[in-house]
Amino acid sequence: MKLVSYRRNGAAGYGVVKDDGIVDIGSRLSSAPTLRALLETDGLEKARELASTSDADFALSEITFDPVIPDPAKIVCIGLNYHDHVQETGREVTPYPTLFPRYPASQCGHQQPMIKPRESDKLDYEGELAVIIGKGGRRIAKDAALGHVAGYSCYNDGSVRDWQGHTSQFMAGKTFVGTGGFGPWMVTADEIPDPSTMSLTTRLNGEVMQESTTDLLITPIPDLIAYISTILPLEPGDVIVSGTPGGVGFKRKPPVYMKDGDTVEIEISKIGTLVNPVVAER
């Protein structure tokens, strides 16, 4: 099942994507007006039932895509989680995952512009697998971790590289407004029982820039869930952005950064393709 958050006629909503369009779930479930609320109320099966017995309410062409979870309580990003990316940055593999936050206001949906800020010409792409939590918990065991996942999506963890390098902490360059592409939708975990079986490709203006498979993650998804949930409880709707493979722009010779008018795509098998135009902030 694919679930999408969107705006239509100025109103926010979410629904299930079918071949002929979208079944508006939010208007049918007063107890769950948002996708995050649906996950909080353990409503995925109810959404599936409604979608199976309902015709599409409107076409995908009638919506503006929002980030899959527009309002997560937490977005936890993982740095340096593929060996080829560690090597290209000249760093060493660490015994524990590198974590940093992103904030909801930094996100943008499928087909919405990624914003190149006025302060920098060094906006870089980072294609990543996003993990959306469905069942919360603290100190989640590795062998139970995938049972806490609601689904998966594509993420472009856009990085403003010069600001990222201002200090040893990543956050300044990782959470500029409109630099985190998230979409197009969430594919539920029952369709992807093993998240280590997907291919990931990043294209900039049609040219392949990153190509890898999720079995090459240094810290796999269950281990990330166990580690992060030891620090603080994970909640339904939380997002874990699992790391990018090698091929990022700032380590190319010469460096390649996204500029006004570019189009960037993150394609992950079993999920789909996140597409964002790049627009310079005016």
Image (cartoon, rainbow, N blue to C red):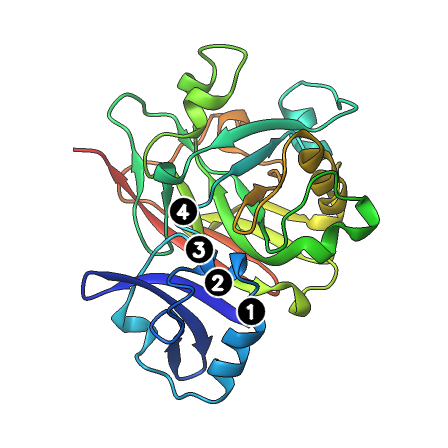
Q: Residue at horizontal 62%, vertical 22%?
A: 89
Q: Residue at horizontal 48%, vertical 59%?
A: 273
In whole angstroms, how far apart are the C-alphas of marks 1 and 3? 15 Å
State which tag comes first along the sequence, 4 or 2. 2
In whole angstroms, how far apart are the C-alphas of marks 4 and 1? 18 Å
Residue farthest toward the front in the current orientation of the protein: 31
Q: Residue at horizontal 32%, vertical 78%?
A: 59
Q: Is the residue under label 1 in contact with that under label 2 (CB below 8 Å)?
A: yes
Residue farthest toward the left in the current orientation of the protein: 282
Left or right side of 104 for 229: right
Quadrant housing the N terminus: bottom right
In whole angstroms, how far apart are the C-alphas of marks 3 and 2? 13 Å
Q: Residue at horizontal 47%, vertical 22%?
A: 171
* Label 1: which secondary element: helix
Q: Mark 4 points at which residue?
A: 71
In this view, 70 is above or below 43? above
Q: Name the residue under label 2.
A: 38
The image's mark for residue 68 is 3
In whole angstroms, how far apart are the C-alphas of marks 2 and 1? 7 Å
Instruction: Select label 4 or label 2 by which is in front.
Output: 2
Q: What residue type is labelled 4?
A: Asp
Res 33 → quadrant? bottom left
Residue situated in front as seen by the camera: 226 or 191? 226
Q: Name the residue under label 1.
A: 44
Where does the image place residue 126, in percent across and percent down from the top left? 51, 38
Q: Is the residue under label 2 in contact with that under label 3 (CB below 8 Å)?
A: no
